[in-house]
Amino acid sequence: MSDSIKKKLKLKVSAISEGTVIDHIPSENLFNVISILELDKVTEMITFGANLDSGKLGSKAIIKISKHFFENDDINRIALIAPHAKLNIIRDYEVVEKKVVEVPDNVVGIVKCFNPKCITNNEAITTKFAVISKEPITLKCQYCEKITSEEQMVIK
Ligand code: CTP
Ligand code: ZN
């Protein structure tokens, strides 16, 4: 195979000139990441790929958001569903910075409380949790004080 074909095959989604590349997203959570980061409100170019081959994850997704840079607090909101995501900050076609996501101390929205009787499961109230363990993730509901463990986590 020629070098030119190899190069074309390697890049599944075109390189961008300026912006953020979020790599190593579990494919099954791609659309949750799009929703949590409110990418529907971004007006610059967004490209993405899903079900791409990845050594580590088996299958990964990638999102490229042109001319857009995130605050750490915003990006850490995806830590629960894309714990191994890597952010690449692109300036003038070069990766100038790589960031990993960190599980935040508090989680607002995103996850459902595991307690069916919790007020957040019965009224239109946004969930709020304190993160009492980051590995494995353990959330304590600020309304009913019940624990939601990593295996019990359901995305809203
Ligand atoms: N990328 C891009 N546009 C650029 C530069 C890079 O879309 N102008 C993308 C690459 O396609 C890749 C990611 O940004 O998905 C990270 O680029 P790079 O660090 O060059 O790749 P890797 O070394 O493979 O990254 P890592 O091993 O950290 O995942
Ligand atoms: Zn609760």
Image (cartoon, rainbow, N blue to C red):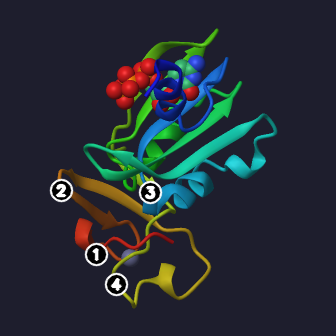
Residue at 63%, 30% (x, y): give it. Answer: 14
Mark before the other along the chain sequence, 1 or 2: 2
On the image, which quarter does residue 36 sit in?
A: bottom right
Q: Can you see residue 89?
A: no
Residue position for label 1: 152
Residue at 74%, 51% (x, y): give it. Answer: 40
Is label 2 in a helix, a strand or a loop? loop
Is label 3 in a helix, a strand or a loop? helix
Identity of the amino acid at label 1?
Gln
Identity of the amino acid at label 2?
Pro
Q: Which mark is residue 27?
A: 3
Residue at mark 4: C-beta within 8 A of ligand 2: yes
Residue position for label 2: 136
Residue 58 location, x and y as percent?
30, 53
Mark before the other along the chain sequence, 3 or 2: 3
Residue position for label 4: 115
Residue at 52%, 28% (x, y): give it. Answer: 5
Q: Nearer the viewer, mark 3 or mark 2?
A: 3
The N terminus sits in image quarter: top left
**Residue, far front:** 1
